[in-house]
Image (cartoon, coloured by chain):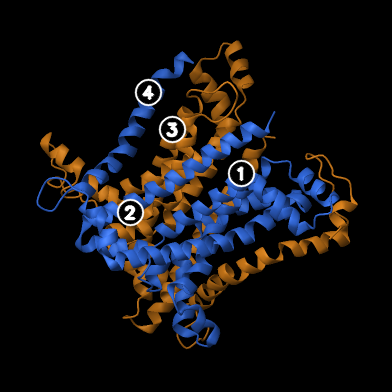
Chain colours: A orange, B blue
């Protein structure tokens, strides 16, 4: 363990790599973390994959995967899941960028520390983006449910939402709720990229006679494009994976892929449904894996400007 | 600065409307009394209703054990990566975002398969109660958030100098970690613990699919089927409480760095 002191501390920008032998030994330090993930994340994923690819008797088959992609109720679930994920990702990304930029360029403190507004926004973003599922469902029922505050106000103002066919436990109601956690997630993801826009670029553009619009159109947006696209992909994956809000808001009346998985797994259905449920899970993991690979590739491009 | 002021007002106005209206509505809804008028009866359900109170205690228990496991896994690993594998930091940074989108419902599906089809003493112990069954998997869900929080904390302290100074004074690596590094990043550690609490107080997907209905969020959703006011009140209270804790940690951390950086 004294190996830590055997070599001089390199400067932070130029880390000295450990000797090969010492490197293997120090890799042991990562073992508990890796082993834990292997058992408790890898374990469930292993059973999803193996169950998806076998019949109830354990014989290998592709029938479950085929059924999960072709049966009408599952196609409808994929269609509405993809629709709500894409829609709320785009809306959340656009609104989130504006909000993040507004917060960033708001009142800045001379000493470069985070002002109270940024602390409030960043902590609130974290809580809402990652853990808001259940409370948000109830907050939206309270606002836009049959007797919700906003519904009553709108009715008093002459707009009858429910008369017009709106329901909070419909796909559009759910989408309205999803945007509430998509925007904060966008703020979290895009703020570092916005911070990476150097003031000198703006000054240079202005000195060359560019308007604010020309600066954004020809300098800032092209630099931000990979980061924006990558963050939008994460938002898509986030909405696609989300289930807590739908579970609390609707008790399963909207066909989404997670809803289909949950009902295929519940005990009172046929045994082969369980394997189809796992196949749906596998489909989900594959779709999200593709999305995340896209995100990582874009992230690498985005990093070019922040070096 | 002046040029951008108008669009900023529009953005903040829209954000305030969209983000505050549901919270205001939730607060109003939660304070409605059954016979008309307003009162705090919905909030008192947490002490009146023994099932809800028991569920809250169960969830707090899960949160404490989960946070302890998460910190035991994350703090040494994050320190170790920064000291010995600085090249890996970028990889881990992007890897920590991956589990954010590994659907809990898929994890739950895999666990439910094990629960239904595999026996044996190990699995019987694992699935014996919500504490033993849910905690290991909540740890996995909390890892990415906790890793980011702790790693950000480590980035703000001269980690290598601290560890080497402690080692030169004769401390073992473990002692250096516990008595030098841990106090230096205590606000990040607290932040990670509160993020874990927020996660445990909001997780219903795995608990519902595995049929552990005695946790707080599941009990709140169940209560919402008959008394929407109670569900709105308690979920709003849990959200605001965890947010207030994180905000307090954020300000406390800010004060500390001001003192330590010249």
- The image quadrant that residue A170 belongs to is bottom left
Question: Residue A143, how many percent across, how many down?
Answer: 23, 45
Question: Residue A217, how many percent across, how many down?
Answer: 52, 25
Which type of secondary structure does the marked residue at label 1 adopt? helix
Query: Please, which chain is the residue tagged with disc 1 on?
Result: A
Marks 4,3: beta carbons within 8 A: no
* Eye-nearest disc, 2 or 3: 2
Q: B234 and A10: which one is in front? A: B234
Query: Please, which chain is the residue tagged with disc 4 on?
Result: B
Q: Is residue A147 above or below residue A114?
A: below
Discs 2 and 3 carry the same chain letter: no
> Is residue A207 found left or right of A168 in the rendered image?
right
Identified at 45% across, 85% down, the residue is A56
Disc 3 crowd rating (10 Å Cα; few below 14, some 14-19, many 20+) is many
Residue A299, label in figure:
1
Question: Residue B250, how many percent across, how many down?
Answer: 52, 40
Identified at 48% across, 39% down, the residue is A122
> Is residue B15 found left or right of A202 in the rendered image?
left
Give the Cα separation between the discs numbered 1 and 3. 21 Å
Indicate which disc, 1 or 3, sits on the residue closer to the N terminus.
3
Residue B9, label in figure:
4
Q: Which residue is mark 3?
A: A99
């Amino acid at each position: 363990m004294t190996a830590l002191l055997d070599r001089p501390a390199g400067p932070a920008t130029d880390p000295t790599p450990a000797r090969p032998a010492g490197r293997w030994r120090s890799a042991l330090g990562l073992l508990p973390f890796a082993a834990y993930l292997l058992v408790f994340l890898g374990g469930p994923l292993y059973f999803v994959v193996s169950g998806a690819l076998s019949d109830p008797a354990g014989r290998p088959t592709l029938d479950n995967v085929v059924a999960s992609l072709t049966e009408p109720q599952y196609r409808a679930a994929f269609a509405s899941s993809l629709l709500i994920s894409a829609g709320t990702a785009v809306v959340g990304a656009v609104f989130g960028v504006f909000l993040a930029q507004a917060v960033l360029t708001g009142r800045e403190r001379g000493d470069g520390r985070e002002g109270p507004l940024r602390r409030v926004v960043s902590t609130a973003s974290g809580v809402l983006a990652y853990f808001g599922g259940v409370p948000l469902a109830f907050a939206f029922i309270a606002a836009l449910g049959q007797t919700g505050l906003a519904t009553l106000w709108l009715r008093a103002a002459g707009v009858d939402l429910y008369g017009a066919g709106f329901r909070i436990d419909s796909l559009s109601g759910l989408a309205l709720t999803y945007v509430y956690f998509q925007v904060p997630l966008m703020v979290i993801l895009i703020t570092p990229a916005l911070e990476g826009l150097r003031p000198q670029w703006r000054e240079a553009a202005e000195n060359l006679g560019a308007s604010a619009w020309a600066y954004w159109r020809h300098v800032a947006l092209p630099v931000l494009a990979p980061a924006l696209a990558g963050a939008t992909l994460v938002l898509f994956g986030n909405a696609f994976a989300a289930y807590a809000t739908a579970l609390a808001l609707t008790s399963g009346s909207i066909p989404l892929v997670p809803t289909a998985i949950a009902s295929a797994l519940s005990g009172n259905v046929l045994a082969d449904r369980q394997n189809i449920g796992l196949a749906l899970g596998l489909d989900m993991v594959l779709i999200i894996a593709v999305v995340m690979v896209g995100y990582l590739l874009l992230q690498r491009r985005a990093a070019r400007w922040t070096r | 600065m002046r040029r951008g002021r108008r669009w900023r007002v529009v953005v903040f106005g829209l954000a305030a409307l969209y983000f505050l209206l549901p919270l205001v509505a939730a607060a109003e809804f939660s304070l409605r009394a059954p016979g008309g008028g307003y009162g705090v009866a919905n909030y008192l359900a947490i002490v009146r209703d023994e099932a809800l109170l028991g569920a809250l205690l169960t969830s707090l228990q899960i949160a404490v054990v989960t946070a302890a496991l998460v910190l035991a896994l994350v703090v040494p690993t994050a320190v170790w990566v920064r000291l010995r594998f600085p090249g890996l930091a970028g990889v881990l940074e992007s890897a920590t975002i991956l589990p954010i989108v590994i659907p809990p419902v898929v994890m739950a599906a895999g666990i439910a398969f094990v629960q239904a089809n595999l026996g044996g003493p190990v699995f019987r112990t694992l699935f014996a109660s919500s504490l033993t069954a849910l905690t290991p998997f909540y740890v996995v869900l909390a890892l990415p958030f906790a890793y980011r929080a702790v790693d950000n904390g480590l980035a703000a302290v001269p980690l290598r100098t601290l560890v080497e100074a402690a080692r030169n004074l004769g401390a073992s690596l473990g002692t250096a970690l516990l008595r030098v590094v841990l106090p230096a990043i205590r606000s990040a550690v607290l932040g990670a613990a509160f993020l874990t609490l927020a996660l445990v107080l909001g997780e219903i997907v795995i608990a519902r699919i595995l049929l552990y209905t005695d946790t707080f969020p599941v009990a709140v959703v169940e209560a919402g089927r008959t008394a929407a006011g109670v569900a709105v009140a308690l979920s709003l209270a849990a959200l605001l409480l965890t947010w207030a804790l994180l905000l307090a940690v954020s300000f406390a951390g800010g004060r500390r760095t001001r003192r330590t950086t010249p």
